[in-house]
Amino acid sequence: MSITQNLTATSFSSSSSAFLAPTTFNSRSQVSLPVKSVGICKCVAAPQEADTVYKTKVSRNGNIAKLQAGYLFPEIARRRNAHLLKFPDAKIISLGIGDTTEPIPEVITSAMAKRSYALSTLEGYSGYGAEQGEKPLRSAIASTFYKDLGIDDDDIFVSDGAKCDISRLQIVFGSNVKMAVQDPSYPAYVDSSVIMGQTGFYLKDVEKFANIEYMRCKPENGFFPNLSSISRPDIIFFCSPNNPTGAAATREQLTQLVQFAKDNGSIIVYDSAYAMYISGDNPRSIFEIPGAKEVALETSSFSKYAGFTGVRLGWTVVPKQLLFSDGFPVAKDFNRIVSTCFNGASNISQAGGLACLSPEGLKAMREVIAFYKENTDIIVETFDSLGFKVYRGKNAPYVWVYFPGRSSWDVFSEILEKTHVVTTPGSGFGPGGEGFVRVSAFGHRENVLEACRRFKQLYK
């Protein structure tokens, strides 16, 4: 029997093909359709388009591939932008990324403007400068922040910010070292360690990278690690006042840290980016501790003092007494890296930095810092009134709020979704930050007050 004879009567239902157009045809009934002459139709799969994307033969850096996600703060910005697409009319208030908001004092900007205009004259023009920074600024940093601490002008390297210097220091240390970081801490320490190849793979069950010593800093121990429980590290990243907890180490605690480094032959990378926020007698520099120059270097910045987050200016102090195991000065290797990777901070930025350290500039910076600390008090009082456990930023522009039993990212999402306020999830600073949210005091006063009103409405 031929195919055409077999198809003399064929039954169809509405489910026979996804390509049938909507119709009033009753799918419960069957209709016999007479068939004329049917030929055999051969269905041939269309070949897929050839992959035309050109790829080089260069392998990706496997260390970068270890990183779990995007860097914390761009990821927060991505979620903020996605939220804005969902709620285009919402007035979003950002108390997440620690970016300054208040204008740079005029005494500082006028100095930068003067230097900028001078570049248009034969007498005032300058090109490349010393990679280590202009001598007047290095001298001013030494006399302002390290007076009577035995730090010389040539121990100071002026840069485009502490974050940049952290990565340059990592190049100096290389891949064959073991890092220790406060947990929680600024994520650039861990991420740069991973990129340099100092770590193993990410361990999802404990949310840590292998071969990094996470020094847990909990409220019970004043956010200072139990050094007796830590295995020997080569490099210790330590930030005080701490980002994100806001805790400032005491003189006794830093004395313990320096002794621990000496006992283990370690180097401390001390991040003092928030030192000017300290109002008590806590040390503002690691070099206030006897013996620190033999085991520590210090990095800092004008970003959170003068609003230089966009201007970009910082410095790192590497004492001559700090030596590698073979006796070679760390400062000489750092100078080599700086000279290779960096052409020096902008001369306009350095003019601003010098103005910052004038009597008028210091007064203006302290006024800006006092403004942000008032914001901190407002935020602390708000969460206190709502019954939360709050670790106040007495010596820092951050408030560390505890949400027991909850995921930091879930709280971040809840606050963003219901109040249109951006915060920072504590777990983004390490596993020790899980259950916490960091609220930044960097904001216009009216925005901080409005954000606090929304917090009260959400959690009352």
Image (cartoon, rainbow, N blue to C red):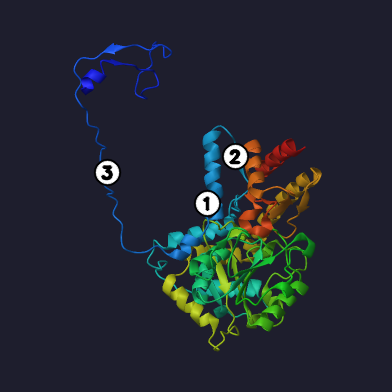
How far apart marks 1 and 3 lie (CA) works out to 35 Å
Q: Secondary structure at mark 2?
A: loop
306 with respect to 338 (left or right): right
Q: Secondary structure at mark 3?
A: loop
Indicate which disc residue 92 carries.
Answer: 2
Which residue sits at x=28%, y=42%?
48
349 with respect to 103 (left or right): left
What residue would you read off at disc 3? 49
Q: Is residue 359 visible?
A: yes
Q: Quadrant of residue 178?
A: bottom right
How far apart marks 2 and 1 lie (CA) works out to 16 Å
Q: Quadrant of residue 61?
A: bottom left
Residue type indicated by callout 3: Glu
For the C terminus, the quadrant is top right
Residue furthest front in the image: 1
Residues packed near mark 1 inside 10 Å, few (<14), some (14 to 19) or many (20 plus): few
| Residue 225 at x, y percent in the picture | 72, 68
Task: Check contact, mark 3 vs mark 2: CB within 8 A.
Answer: no
Between 192 and 279, the residue placed more toward the observer is 192
Reply above or below: 169 against 163: below
For the N terminus, the quadrant is top left
How far apart marks 3 and 2 lie (CA) works out to 44 Å
